[in-house]
Image (spheres, rainbow, N blue to C red):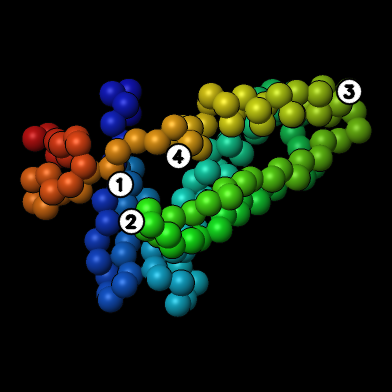
Amino acid sequence: MSDGLRRVSLERTSKGRMLARNERGSTLAIGMGEDCDFTPVELLLAAIAGCSAIDVDLITGKRSAPEEFAVDAVGVKIRDQLGNRLVELAIDFRVRFPDTDAGRAAEEVLARAITASHDRLCTVSRTVEVGSPVSAGLRGERLAGSDPLPPEPGG
């Protein structure tokens, strides 16, 4: 993945249900919220939280493993003149380290790690906050947006 291009493919499995597949072969079922599958909105929230959680874990984990590490992600779905979207996006960390010198060292960098992830490290939340056009295409031909679709692998 050194070229920067990231790709996920979706395939319909039944009405309103898709199977996402990454280039490494992992799959994830996506649905409309009528069963236990994640919805696209839930996946967006998980991506925001997951991206920052990994950043923070890598930074603090150099000092100590946590005793507790959880992140909640929330957003309010609205419909207005701009269409359907999420507002008031927020993530909240619950992290506890052991009462040791290493644990205290990790606690000392925790707030800075969360801020660094939010302000510059997390690709997902940075993309959401800064914004990026999303083009739509049909069989490789652009229908909407300003950028063409990336080429197919090997093509």
Give the x, y percent position of residue 46: 53, 50
Marker disc for residue 20: 2
In the rendered structure, are the residues bearing label 1 and label 2 in contact, judged by CB atoms less than 8 Å apart?
Answer: yes
Q: Residues within 10 Å of mark 1 (few under 14, many from 20)?
A: few
Above or below 138: residue 99: above
Q: Disc 3 residue type?
A: Asp
Q: What element carries label 1?
A: strand
* Residue extending furthest toward the front: 81
Disc 1 to disc 4, C-alpha distance: 18 Å
* Residue sitting at x 50%, y 60%: 77
The tally of labels here is 4
* Residue sitting at x 57%, y 48%: 89
In the rendered structure, are the residues bearing label 3 and label 1 in contact, judged by CB atoms less than 8 Å apart?
Answer: no
Q: Residues within 10 Å of mark 4 (few under 14, many from 20)?
A: few
Q: Earlier in the sequence, mark 1 or mark 4?
A: 1
Q: How crowded is mark 2: few (under 14 residues within 10 Å), some or many (20 or more)?
A: some
Q: Disc 4 residue type?
A: Val
Q: Mark 3 points at which residue?
A: 101
Q: Earlier in the sequence, mark 3 or mark 2?
A: 2
Q: Mark 1 points at which residue?
A: 8
Q: Disc 1 residue type?
A: Val
Quarter of the rendering occupied by the C terminus: top left
Q: Name the residue under label 4.
A: 128
Q: Is residue 99 left or right of residue 73?
A: right
Q: Which of marks 1 and 2 is nearer the N terminus?
A: 1
Q: Is mark 4 on a helix, strand or loop?
A: helix
